[in-house]
Image (cartoon, rainbow, N blue to C red):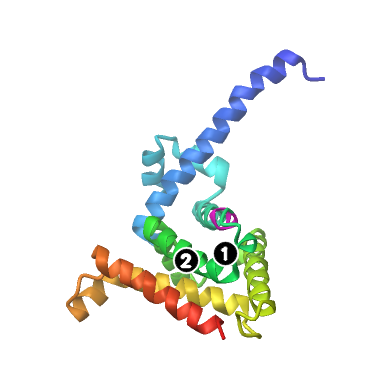
Amino acid sequence: MTSSKDSTAALPRSRDADRSQLAILAAAREEFSEHGFAGGRVDRIAERADMNKRLIYYYFGNKDDLFLAVLEGTYADIRTAEQKLRLTEIDPVEAIRQLVSFTWHYHVDHPEFISLLSSENLQRAEHLKRSSRIREMNSPLVQLLDTVLERGRRDGLFRAGIDPVQLYVSIASLCYFYLSNNHTLSTIFGRNLRAPKAMAQRLSHMIDMVLGYVMH
């Protein structure tokens, strides 16, 4: 039987382990977002986290498993933030407007999200295919959007037959492509598409496009 003293002594070690894993994940997110999965190095992650490299392997197994943990954490962050919008509690038109605005600002504020997704697509989603959590994370979002669309349809605001998955992919794509290709697009068109005015115009354009599609 474990004594009370032994249990108390174990608590700091448990907290230290949690802090160590969080530090490793934060360092890994920075490393992989800067260098991609292929270019990311466990040695540099250890340096960033100020951690012994052996601890990384102890907690996460190998580089592939660490990258998967980073991806899962990245998706969990955006899904958690989306849930805070409470879209089912507001007017359906405003809910769609807020979802587009949120998705845009999240991509702008979290460039590592774009970098990590781009890297995983180069890997043909080999890491995410092994995840037992990723689909569970995304299903609440689909249900949330489906509820908003159905409310809008019942109120006579939205047309019927809109696939929530297709709609969300379109919203995310409108944000993702503009930002991930900003350097090339700005060069090709001779305009600073990252200028505040251009960014505001982009958001307004996306909202108009999405609402134009869903509404009667």
Q: Is residue 99 magenta?
A: no
Q: Is residue 1 above or below residue 191?
A: above
Which amino acid type is marked by label 2? Glu
Q: Is residue 82 magenta?
A: yes
Give the residue at mark 1: 128
| Main SS class of the magenta portion in the image | helix
Q: CA distance from mark 2 to mark 1?
A: 8 Å
Give the residue at mark 2: 120
How many other residues sit within 10 Å of disc 2, few (<14), some (14-19) or many (≥20)?
some
> Among all residues in the image, which is located at the extreme left?
190
Q: Is residue 99 visible?
A: yes
- Closer to us: 121 or 86: 86
The picture places residue 38, in percent across and down from the top left corner, at 40, 62
Q: Are marks 2 and 1 in contact (CB under 8 Å)?
A: yes
At a point 56% along the width and 46% down the height, the residue shown is 60
The picture places residue 39, in percent across and down from the top left corner, at 36, 59
Label 2 sits on a secondary structure element that is: helix
- Closer to us: 6 or 179: 179
How many other residues sit within 10 Å of disc 1, few (<14), some (14-19) or many (≥20)?
some
The picture places residue 138, in percent across and down from the top left corner, at 62, 64
The picture places residue 130, in percent across and down from the top left corner, at 62, 63
Residue 214 left/right relative to 10: left
Residue 30 left/right relative to 92: left
Span shown in magenta: 79-83
Which amino acid type is marked by label 1? Leu
